[in-house]
Image (cartoon, grey):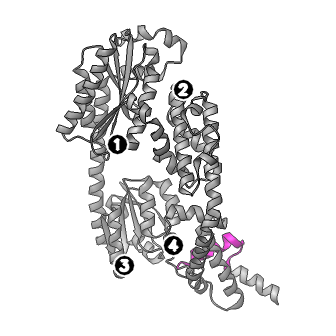
Amino acid sequence: MYKVFLVDDEIVVREGIRTSFPWDSSGFVLAGEAPDGEIALSLLREIKPDILITDIRMPFMDGLALSREALAFMPSLKIIILSGYDEFTYAREALTLGVKEYLLKPVSAQELENALRRVSLQIDEDRRLHADLQAVRKQLELSSGLMKEQFLREVLQGIRDEEKRSNVFLNARKLDIELTKRYCRVMLISIRQTAPTDTLLPKALVTRVADSQPKGSVYLCQLDGLLAMLYLSDDAGVMEEQVFGVAGAIKHEAADLDLPAMHIAIGSQAGSIYQAPDSLASAFVTLKAMRGHMSEDSTSIMDNADTQAEMSEVISLADDASLYDRLRFAAVSDIGGVVNAFLSKDGVAQRSTLMLNYLLVESILTASRIIRENGGDPEKLLPHGMQDERGIALLTKPEDISKAAQGALTRALEFRDTQSLSRYSETIRQACSFIEDNYTDPNVSLSDAAASVHLSLNHFCTVFSQETGTTFIGYLTHLRLERAKQLLENTQMRSSEVALEVGYRDPHYFSYLFKKNSGLSPRDWRKERQVDGS
């Protein structure tokens, strides 16, 4: 059975599809419906349908905006667009979102069934592909030796448990791992991924190259979405040649086989295996520098010596897209949760001091970028000691690092908010004027309001809320209902006529909103005003 969700602001259309289509015998089930995109969005999160059928022109949130939002958290969702003849060109824009089917109103039961059948074939194919990928992944996990990988991850990240630490060499021998060498070094490999299968061949190449090395000198495991190689040797010079030889072999073979690009980051040389976390941390810092400076289209190599030479540039120029994207439109009150989640995600408590400092650098870089984007000078605005490595390195405890990160980000967001008060006041005033001029149009949407002042949807939502103290929907609803009250009190228009006059096609939905906001139905509200006025 395939679950279908229907969204259309016309009751007649929804009832027609609900009653005329043979749901019981078709293999499809109508799992839910909604009169507009905003209501639909919350229901979609709960129901998680396989197929979404949506009108393209609706109040509050149109079909394209709904499709975009729904695909963000349900990428496998299949979408069928309903469109009028005059909306054909607009409907075609939906193709860029991955919409495969659109139907022109009025829609017959046979047309709908044909479209659903075509979409169901795509769903079946996606499910088969997913099952195949799961089988391949399971086989790879079984063949790689899960216990050995887990042990290597613990060694690389630092064994905190005293009992495990005292038995580390005994446990290593049980897993056929030889750790009794004088030197160790860590290499991290990041594979550029644009599709689920992109990493399979690069991983196979790296595994083959690692297996070709002398027994007991190289161990491979997966770590936080990366490949980690642990090198062990009693001769530092031999290990140096081996590390760069392996890195070069991977780079050249990847180019010959036209594999996805890789970043190969080589950490610093360390002493005994207990110092492996320090080499891992320096490899992470090196990888960060590569992502900031090197091409994403070809495999590249950088070692810790190169990183140290360029560290000042990394601190001033590099940025972390993930932390930046989470915080550039966030409120100051969101900082604590975001920073703690970021630290927990990266397992900071299990890594070395250097790795903790690296994560703090991410916060400093993000804060600096936000300040610069808003016309400020990070050196003047950030806390003293946050502009160089020495000041950062003085912080060693996770709680101190979290506090410092939050302090820097708080300065940045407070500065951004101060700047935005003057910058966006006129912009939002223009947006409010646009809404006031167009609130009677049933099709006016959040996207329209954002476009009227040339802001992205997410940015507009954040700024509008900061400036007005309410959401776009809240502002629009308030305008419509206040106008509705005037019409109910001063005219003899029926409730359904008032609904249309203020921008609601569905009189039932209008009555629902009116009662929700005023506590009375439109009819009762009018009666109460008439009694008060008599």
The amino acid on which the numbered mark 2 sits, given as a three-letter code, is: Thr
Quarter-wise, where is residue 134 in the image? top left
* Residue at x 36% of width, y 19% of height: 148
What is the x, y in percent for residue 441?
A: 53, 81
Foreground mark, 1 or 2?
1
Give the distance between the C-alpha atoms of the residues marked 3 and 1, in whole angstroms.
45 Å
* Residue at x 64% of width, y 37% of height: 403
Q: How many marks can you see?
A: 4
Label 4 SS: loop
Give the distance between the C-alpha atoms of the residues marked 3 and 2, in whole angstroms.
59 Å
Viewer-side residue, 304 vs 434: 304
Quarter-wise, where is residue 28 in the image? bottom left
From where the camera sits, is residue 217 visible?
A: no
Label 3 SS: helix
Residue bearing the label numbered 4: 445
What is the x, y in percent for residue 307?
A: 41, 33
Q: Are marks 3 and 2 in contact (CB under 8 Å)?
A: no
Which badge, 1 or 2, comes first in the chain's sequence?
Answer: 1
Give the distance between the C-alpha atoms of the residues marked 4 and 3, in whole angstroms.
16 Å
The amino acid on which the numbered mark 1 sits, given as a three-letter code, is: Met
The stretch in magenta equals 505-522
Which badge, 3 or 2, comes first in the chain's sequence?
Answer: 3
Label 1 SS: loop
Residue bearing the label numbered 3: 87
Give above or below for 388 relative to 221.
below
Residue bearing the label numbered 1: 294
Residue 353's label in the rendered image is: 2
